[in-house]
Image: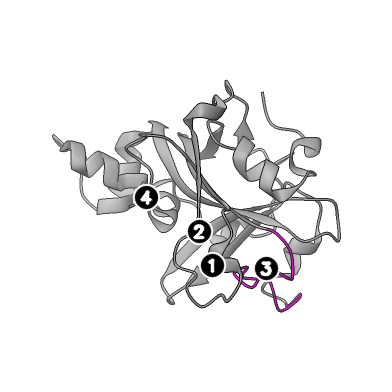
């Protein structure tokens, strides 16, 4: 069952935690890509100096102002794209970065997308490296800012989050977020969530 608006229109930290174990579904060109969300990070408001949108709304960050459930994708290092889900009520800014997924369906197509070669006798390392990072899974699942920035996971027929069995609290790990050393306060917030011992969690 597709997650509804009320799931996303909640506290960003709760949304980040509760997305663990849910399935991100993307259908394109007759291919179904499904990845179980295994790692997230919450970016909580304009006071969070680790947040990409902490300096306010710009043309690049404008979608943060919309209701929870919208898609916020941005570029980093001029070559990678990161997939975020807007949280909170309209005009209350928060977003969840999806850091890693476990491939569940469409693995052969993911392999071609990531490695630019045919799927043939992949190693365990090859499979894990498909989606164990925020830019990796976006490439593997053939998602792009150009197609999906501002899209709505609640009613878009191409992409959505599907419900699944909740992850027991004892299997959820909470830690500091990654690669935000530029932040003065935000770097110490424990706003990264991941499924304990899942091999697809980013390194």
Residue 182 counted in the magenta span: no
Q: Are marks 4 and 2 in contact (CB under 8 Å)?
A: no
- The tag on residue 48 is 3
- Quadrant showing the N terminus: top right
The colour scheme applied to this rendered structure is one colour
Residue range of the region highlighted in magenta in the rendering: 44-58
Instruction: Give me the C-alpha separation between circle 4 and circle 2.
Output: 11 Å
**Sequence order check, earlier mark of 4 and 1:** 1
**Sequence order check, earlier mark of 3 and 4:** 3
**Sequence order check, earlier mark of 2 and 1:** 2
Classify mark 3: helix, strand or loop.
Answer: loop
Which residue does the image show at 74% across and 62% down from the upper left?
Answer: 64
Location of residue 50 with respect to 83 vertically, above or below? below
Instruction: Give me the C-alpha separation between circle 3 and circle 4.
Output: 22 Å
Which residue does the image show at 28% across and 47% down from the upper left?
Answer: 129
Q: Are marks 3 and 2 in contact (CB under 8 Å)?
A: no
- The tag on residue 187 is 1
Residue 103 x, y percent position in the rendering:
39, 35
Which residue does the image show at 21% across and 43% down from the upper left?
Answer: 126
Residue 153 x, y percent position in the rendering:
68, 43
- The answer to which quarter of the image holds residue 160 is top right
Instruction: Give me the C-alpha separation between circle 4 and circle 1.
Output: 18 Å
Question: Mark 2, residues whose alpha carbon is within 10 Å: few (<14), some, or many (≥20)?
Answer: many
Q: Which residue is mark 2?
A: 177
Q: Which residue is mark 4?
A: 202
Magenta residues, dominant SS class: loop
Classify mark 1: helix, strand or loop.
Answer: helix
- 8 relative to 110 in the view: left or right: right
**Sequence order check, earlier mark of 1 and 3:** 3
Residue 118 x, y percent position in the rendering:
20, 44
Classify mark 4: helix, strand or loop.
Answer: loop
């Amino acid at each position: 069952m597709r997650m509804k608006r009320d799931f996303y229109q909640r506290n960003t930290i709760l949304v980040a935690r509760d997305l663990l174990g849910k399935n991100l579904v993307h259908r394109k060109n007759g291919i179904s890509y499904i990845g179980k969300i295994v790692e997230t990070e919450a970016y909580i408001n304009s006071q969070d100096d680790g947040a990409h949108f902490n300096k306010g709304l710009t043309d690049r960050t404008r979608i943060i102002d919309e209701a929870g459930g919208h898609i916020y994708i941005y570029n980093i290092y001029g070559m990678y794209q990161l997939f975020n889900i807007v949280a909170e009520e309209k005009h209350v800014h928060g977003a969840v970065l999806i850091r890693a997924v476990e491939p569940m369906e469409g693995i052969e197509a993911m392999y071609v997308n990531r490695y630019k070669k045919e799927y043939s006798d992949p190693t365990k390392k090859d499979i894990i490296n498909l989606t164990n990072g925020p830019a990796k899974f976006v490439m593997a699942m053939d998602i792009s800012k150009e197609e999906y920035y501002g899209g709505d996971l609640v009613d878009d027929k191409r992409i959505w989050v599907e419900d699944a069995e909740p992850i027991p609290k004892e299997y959820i790990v909470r830690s500091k977020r990654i690669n935000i050393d530029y932040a003065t306060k935000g770097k110490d917030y424990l706003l990264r969530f991941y499924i304990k011992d899942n091999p697809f969690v980013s390194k």
